[in-house]
Each structure stands twice: as C-alpha cells, then as structure tokens.
Image (tube, grey):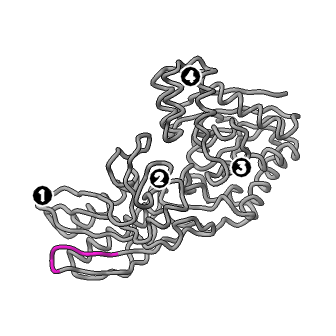
Amino acid sequence: MDRKSRPGNDGEDSGNSATRGHETPPLRRGYTTGACAAAAAKGAALLLITGEAYETVDIDLPAGFRHTFQLTGWQRYSISSAICATVKDAGDDPDATHRAWIEATVSWREDQEIEIDGGQGVGRVTKPGLPVPVGEAAINPVPREMIREAIADVLEEHGAARGLRVVISVPEGEAIAQKTLNPRLGILGGISILGTRGVVTPFSTEAYKASVKQAISVAAAAGNREIVLTTGGSSEKYAIAMFPTLPEEAFIQMGEYVGFSLEHAKAYGISKITLVGMAGKYSKVAQGAMLIHSKNAPVDFGFLSRIAEEAGADRELTAQVEAANTASQVVDLMTEAGNMVFFEQLCLHACRHCLNHMGGGTAVEMVLITMKGRVLGRAEIGE
C-alpha cells in the first residue's frame, strides 16, 4: 500500500504496515468507535426517512477510503425516530471496545440543524484538557464531523429539509470504560467515541514487533545509517516533511515499542536514530518508559511538573502542570506561558534514557511536535 492510501495516526488509529509492503503481510485493521457511530447514524437516518432497514452502509473515512459497515438492531418508532446499530471490529488487536454494540438514535428537529449527543454508555467530560468541552458527551471532534457528514448526505440525498438529533449510545459502555483510563481522565458514565482516521491497526502484537524488526532490517540493508522512528501515521507524515532527503524505507512506525526498536536499530548498525512524535507519548520516554502503551506507562504529571521547574516555571505554573488532566493540557499550559525550554528538557531526558537503554553506541535525536506538526522542542545526544 502506498503512503497516500496508508491509514494512520497516533491515537486510537495507526498506520497500516510498518514494512511498507515488504514480505510481512499487514495485520487486519479494524474500525474506530467514531467510524462505527457514523455508520450507525447513517443507517438510523435512512430507516427514519425511507422506512427501509439497510443491512449495510458505506462511510467515507478520514483515512481516505470508503468502507462498508454491517448494520443491525433496527427499530422505527412511528415517523418520529429510529434506531440502528453496528458492532465494532477492532481488527487483529482487540481493544476494550472490540465487539461493542454502537447504537444511534435519530429523531426529527424543527429546524435544519444536526445535533449530536451521547446516550447510555457514552461518557461525559468533567475535567478540562480534553478535545471536548466540560459537560459535553465524550464524542471527539473528528467522529462528530463524520456523523454530521453522514447525516447531511442522507438528508440531501432524500430532499429532507429538516434537521436531526443524533444520540450515540453504547449499552455496555459504562462497564467497558472501567477497563480504560476514562475514569481517571474525568470521563464519567461510559466510553469515549474516538478516532481521527476511522481505522484501527494493532500495535501490540508479536506480529507487529516482527514487522518493525523487518522494517529496520530493510532500511539497514538499503544502506541507511539514519532512521526515523514514529508512533504512527500522523507523526510519520510530519517526519517525512522534516527530513525530505531520507528515503522512504528510513521511516518506520514503531507503535508503542520504543525500547524494542532502539535495540534492533543499534543491532543493525544504525548510527543515528531520530524519534518524532507528540508530547503525550514521548513524555513517557522522558520518564524512562520504553514501552509507551497507556496500560504500561501512564503520564507522570509529577515528573512533568519537575521538568517545568527545571525549565524555570514559577510555582503557580508547576502546580497547574502537576494538577493537569492530560499531556495535551500540559502542552497548552507551557506553550501559553512561552516556556519552550520545557520541551527541550523533555527531549534531553528522553534522549538520555534511550541511550542508556541501548548502552550508547549511536546518536539519538528527539523531536516533539503538536498534532498539527509544529515543532515544540528538539534535542540530540550521542556519537
């Protein structure tokens, strides 16, 4: 699969294959809760407007392709509302929401607006620092837009001059949320509806680790002595723009496996390793974590507060950092304060831990970026 068609991001979704079509076959991808919610909403809107229970619907995914979703759970209440659902398939790396029933209820509005809310099993945001305001349903911005576009398409296609209220529910969502970080993040009452690309590809299987190792082997065999490691497709996209002289095989999506990737890069004779990614994940490397999945390495806000102090932040700001809800909120706090030394310090700590993990012998560079690719901090240590 070529780069333009490869889905990927650094949150719930990720790239399709670390080996870019080399011998190891790609793992079976799944679809995000956001994509499933959009599909269910489209099915419910079609049922309400046409009276027909569609068995499948096609949804345009942000990853750049269409996917056909199987539908179920149809219910129509007179001419006022309808329900439809789909069952989430997380692909070859089942997560907490794998096989979850994602349901949408649609009902007519008097105006032409499309309203989106959460029902049973969809959490409510109670703390700042998330991409959804406090008090709203934990349906992230991209899924909201996917739902809105799916509904708008149905309304336009059938000439409906009214708006719809869409309520997304996950009947088992409250129980599922106990297996996630949602309670600690202040998302109460259920799961979040997530996804920036619409697709989910596993990063936590032995098969994926094997593909990372093979990608490093391919890069080394092609004569590369410098590689760029990223956690997923979004950070890789920005890394490619940063290092235009490096060949395609020098860019490797390592997922959560920082230590594993570093070890194999050194073993294959790579002389410089650059890690490009976002502060949320790489702040964990600065803490010393070499496996950065949320289950293995939560963000340590006390550590980030100490780094802020090292960077010259005053007591009020360091206290705000320690009390933060997400790494994204910390990034906002330090950026608003104009304290970019904080990000350089994070990079330096991360580089030291990477070198210590490998026992030296190579150079390590860390580049922290925002979700939009802006460089926050950069540092390099080693030979």
- Residue under label 1, please give it: 111
Q: Amino acid at mark 3?
A: Leu
Q: Amino acid at mark 4?
A: Met
Q: Considering only order in the chain, which callout, 3 or 1, is on the residue closer to the N terminus?
A: 1
Residue sitting at x 66%, y 35%: 243
Q: CA distance from mark 2 to mark 1?
A: 29 Å
Q: Which element is circle 3 on?
A: loop
Q: Amino acid at mark 1?
A: Asp
Mark 1 touches mark 4? (CB < 8 Å): no
Q: CA distance from mark 2 to mark 3?
A: 23 Å
- Residue under label 3, please give it: 291
Q: Amino acid at mark 2?
A: Thr
Residue sitting at x 49%, y 20%: 338
Q: Nearer the viewer, residue 360 or 289?
A: 289
- Residue under label 4, please give it: 340
* Residue lying furthest left: 110
Q: Considering only order in the chain, which callout, 4 or 3, is on the residue closer to the N terminus?
A: 3
Magenta-tinted stretch = 78-84
Q: Considering only order in the chain, which callout, 4 or 1, is on the residue closer to the N terminus?
A: 1
- Residue under label 2, please give it: 196
The answer to whether 244 is drawn above or below residue 153 in the figure is above
Q: Which element is circle 1 on?
A: loop
Q: CA distance from mark 1 to mark 4?
A: 47 Å
Q: Rate crowding at label 1 as few (under 14), some (14 to 19) or many (20 or more) other CA atoms within 10 Å.
A: few
**Number of the front mark, 4 or 2:** 4
Mark 4 touches mark 2? (CB < 8 Å): no
- Location of residue 38 in the rendering, given as x and y in whole percent from the top left corner: 37, 64
Let me know if residue 320 is in the magenta part: no
Q: Considering only order in the chain, which callout, 2 or 4, is on the residue closer to the N terminus?
A: 2
